[in-house]
Amino acid sequence: MPKVEITIPEHLEMQIAQMVERGEFVNREEAIEDLLSTGIKAYKTSGPMDEEDAGLEDDGMMGHDDEYVF
């Protein structure tokens, strides 16, 4: 697995350390990997859209004005 070195603000480091201490994650590496993965998934679902997706936000997911399909 590739290694990445990052610098994060102290408040984020403290939050990660607290999650590890509470047992939400086994260690910092697992916490950062899981949180980064979750962030990327959230970005993909609410971030910028591809050109082929443009316009769907105004017409509903299936092109209907009042219906959204998930």
Image: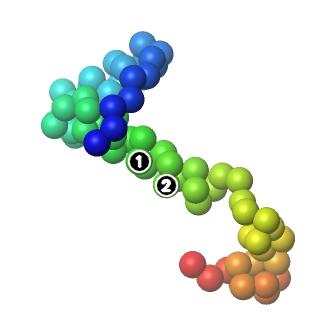
Residue at the top extreme of this rendering: 10
Q: Distance between the residues labelled 1 and 2?
A: 6 Å
Q: In this view, does 50 lie above or below 66?
A: above
Residue 30 picture quarter: top left
Please provide percent x and percent y for residue 36.
42, 41
Q: Secondary structure under badge 1? A: helix
Q: Secondary structure under badge 2? A: helix
Q: Of 24 and 66, which appears nearest the observer?
A: 24
Q: Is residue 60 above or below residue 21?
A: below
| Residue 28 can be seen in this image | yes
Mark number for residue 41? 2
Label 1 crowd (10 A; few <14 / some 14-19 / many >=20): few
The amino acid marked with disc number 2 is Lys
The amino acid marked with disc number 1 is Ser
The residue where tag 1 is placed is 37
Residue 2 picture quarter: top left
Q: Are marks 1 and 2 in contact (CB under 8 Å)?
A: yes
Residue at the (43%, 49%) spot, across then down: 38
Residue at the front extreme of this rendering: 2
Residue at the (29%, 36%) spot, across then down: 31
Q: Is residue 33 above or below residue 67?
A: above
